[in-house]
Amino acid sequence: MKTFGETIREIRINKNIKQKNMSSVRQSSLANIESGRIPSVEIFMDILQELDINVLEFFYIQNDFKLVERDHLFKLFREQKQSLNEPFLLSLIAKYDEYLSRANDPFAESLRHVLSISVEINRKQTFDIESQEAKDIWERIAMQEVWYHNDIYLITKIFYTFPVDHAEKVIVRTTEELKKI
């Protein structure tokens, strides 16, 4: 993977922008960044704006035009259209397990639990299952004053495992949180 500076330089040169023509940062500072100095978040965001590149695209370029592993796994998760393809689910669980053996990533861990829940639902052919993982995810998110995008995404993947009266409460809270976005 390229460094921040190498990636900034690559984008800048590809867009035919000279260091001296960058208004978001002094030429000497940009030269230092392109030589390996890590910019502050504010300067980094200013540079990206001037280069007309968003953060996700920057990291995609930095990773040689490939998604980073976490984003690739999330993409595979989202592409799963239904929970009946057990071989696909088990293969994806193995990929998540391999990733999680190297990374402390609560969101990926929660997605891995959702995959296990899908396998259980498929095997039992019912949504009426007892899932401690789903309860743990719910309890963690429910305690938060504000729910973020990933929290809402997870809730939409597990609410159907709860008893109807509890699922209704989850849906009401999720709807309230969605209105904030």
Image (cartoon, rainbow, N blue to C red):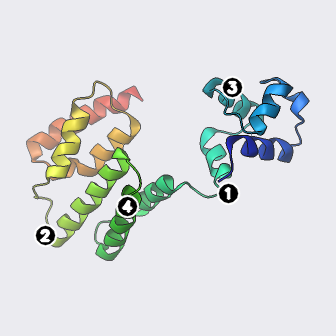
Residue type at mark 3: give it: Ile
The numbered dot on residue 43 is: 3
**Residue 139 placement: quadrant:** top left
Residue 118 screen position, x and y as percent: 24, 62
Residue 174 screen position, x and y as percent: 28, 35
Q: CA distance from mark 3 to mark 1?
A: 23 Å
Instruction: Compare marks 4 and 1 and give the one earlier in the sequence.
Output: 1
Q: Residue at x 44, y 55 (%)?
A: 74
Q: Residues within 10 Å of mark 1 (few under 14, many from 20)?
A: few
Q: Which residue has dot 1 on it?
A: 64
Q: Residues within 10 Å of mark 4 (few under 14, many from 20)?
A: many
Q: Is residue 81 visible?
A: no
Dots 4, 2 in contact, CB < 8 A: no
Q: Residue at x 34, y 45 (%)?
A: 106
**Quadrant including the N terminus:** bottom right
Residue type at mark 1: give it: Asp
Instruction: Compare marks 2 and 1 and give the one earlier in the sequence.
Output: 1
Residue type at mark 4: give it: Tyr
**Quadrant including the C terminus:** top left
Q: Residue at x 23, y 37 (%)?
A: 140
